[in-house]
């Protein structure tokens, strides 16, 4: 089994080839199969996979460090890796039968997703029938299974509707090519269509189980990793690529700023005190966000290993901190690119891809802090806060 240090080193060793593939991947609007194979060969998808299926079952900090290193070279690569790899964690929360359905034949099988709660559900004997159309399924062409979100109607009088994730094999859904975007072009985040597919009960995961940590998979996957609330890992899988992308953008900016001299003023970018301040703030904020990410999961894992619950106010604060990452990173790069003059508008400028990708990443619903403002402020004010996706 690889160590955390070895896994991050492998991710950094892949950076040159990811940079070389980036333009072609953007044009294809999908990561090449070779990149996914490289991730498989490096063991990256095993980081959050249960040990019973040959996974490493490591702490999430390792997963995030690998994701950041990949995104530093190519944000689409880091984004798709984060999405596909976090599903190995969620499948470990499913009933053992569902894990066997996916991994008994091939434990390297990958799952894509779109959790939009737009599916139409009908209860039937033994499970559900599902139909609908979902958007934004990143990396869907590389998965053999799919997680889809839907609201399950009440099962009886007085029962509330509730959110579930539904697991479907590739033959039960269709990919519709829709991904024509200004950023994260190579993520291939196409639409998914399902027409009246049957999903057995054991291939569903209740959002309430993810919140309460009463997941059926915990009966067999008993390590501390699978005691983590599902949302805590998921939201960070969405925001962390931006940290890597911001680091890549800062490096690209610095390379250009070292030698840039304005043809209009004759001044160098590196001598401009306003540009110096913008660069210093970007470097400091990226380091701070990285440190908060690690601190939060260090605390989570320490509590779980001690058999103690994670305080609800901490869970809410951790989610809020995750939601702010993409916007803060995008804001910094939006500021830096202005100091490179008119030449920054050319696609040949290496900062452009990061700039576009970061501005696309901040549009994801999990990267919108407005949805958690009220809950975080409520905990500070001593109110009774009802928040479940934390």
Image (tube, rainbow, N blue to C red):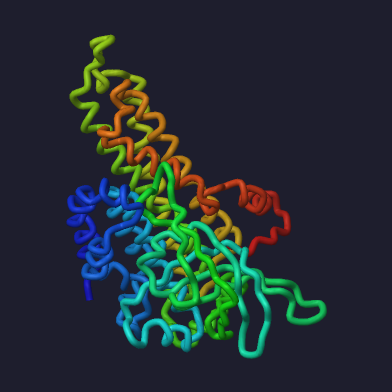
Q: Tell me where residue 239 appears, x and y as whole percent.
A: 44, 52
Height in image: 161 above or below 76? below
Q: Can residue 344 be seen in this view?
A: yes
168 with respect to 131 (left or right): left
Residue at (45% x, 87% y) in the render: 220
Height in image: 267 above or below 143? above
Q: In this rendered view, identify the residue nearer to me: 75 or 328.
A: 75
Q: Tell me where residue 20 appears, x and y as whole percent.
A: 20, 48
Residue at (32% x, 55% y) in the render: 77
Residue at (37% x, 25% y) in the render: 338
Residue at (57% x, 63% y) in the render: 133
Counting labels gives 0
Q: In this rendered view, identify the residue nearer to me: 10 or 373.
A: 10
Q: Is residue 212 visible?
A: no
For the N terminus, give its image quadrant: bottom left
Quarter location, residue 379: bottom right
Q: Tell me where residue 202 appears, x and y as whole percent.
A: 54, 85
Height in image: 216 above or below 296? below
Q: In this rendered view, identify the residue nearer to me: 179 or 348.
A: 179
Quarter location, residue 134: bottom right
Q: In this rendered view, identify the residue nearer to me: 349 or 273.
A: 349
Q: Tell me where residue 157 appears, x and y as whole percent.
A: 82, 80
For the C terminus, give its image quadrant: bottom right
125 with respect to 111 (left or right): right
Q: Residue furthest top?
A: 265
């Amino acid at each position: 089994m690889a160590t955390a240090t070895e896994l991050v080193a492998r991710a950094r060793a892949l950076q040159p080839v990811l940079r070389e593939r980036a333009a072609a991947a953007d044009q294809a609007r999908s990561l090449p199969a070779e990149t996914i194979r490289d991730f498989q060969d490096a063991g990256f998808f095993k980081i959050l996979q249960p040990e019973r299926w040959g996974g490493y079952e490591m702490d999430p900090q390792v997963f995030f460090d690998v994701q950041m290193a990949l995104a530093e070279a190519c944000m689409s690569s880091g984004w798709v890796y984060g999405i596909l790899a976090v599903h190995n964690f969620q499948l470990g929360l499913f009933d053992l039968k569902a894990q066997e359905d996916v991994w008994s034949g091939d434990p390297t099988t990958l799952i894509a997703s779109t959790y939009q709660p737009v599916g139409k559900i009908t209860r039937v004997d033994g499970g559900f029938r599902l139909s609908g159309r979902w958007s934004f399924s990143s990396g869907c062409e590389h998965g053999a299974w799919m997680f889809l979100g839907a609201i399950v109607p009440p099962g009886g009088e007085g029962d509330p509707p509730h959110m579930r994730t539904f697991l479907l094999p590739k033959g039960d859904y269709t990919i519709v090519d829709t991904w024509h975007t200004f950023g994260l072009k190579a993520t291939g985040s196409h639409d998914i269509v399902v027409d009246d597919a049957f999903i057995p009960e054991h291939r569903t995961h209740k959002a309430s189980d993810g919140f309460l940590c009463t997941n059926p998979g915990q009966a067999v996957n008993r390590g501390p990793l699978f005691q983590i609330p599902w949302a805590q890992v998921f939201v960070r899988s969405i925001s962390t690529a931006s940290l890597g992308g911001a680091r890549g953008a800062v490096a690209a900016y610095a390379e250009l700023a070292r030698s840039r001299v304005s043809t209009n003023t004759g001044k160098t970018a590196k001598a401009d005190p306003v540009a110096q301040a913008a660069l210093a703030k970007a470097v400091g904020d990226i380091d701070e966000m990285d440190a908060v990410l690690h601190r939060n999961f260090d605390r989570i894992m320490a509590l779980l290993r001690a058999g103690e619950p994670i305080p609800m106010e901490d869970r809410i604060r951790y989610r809020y901190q995750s939601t702010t990452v993409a916007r803060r990173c995008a804001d910094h790069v939006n500021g830096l690119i202005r100091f490179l003059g008119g030449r920054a508008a050319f696609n040949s400028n290496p900062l452009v891809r990061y700039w576009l990708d970061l501005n696309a990443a901040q549009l994801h619903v999990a990267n919108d802090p407005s949805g958690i403002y009220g809950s975080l402020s409520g905990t500070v004010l001593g109110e009774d806060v009802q928040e479940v996706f934390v």
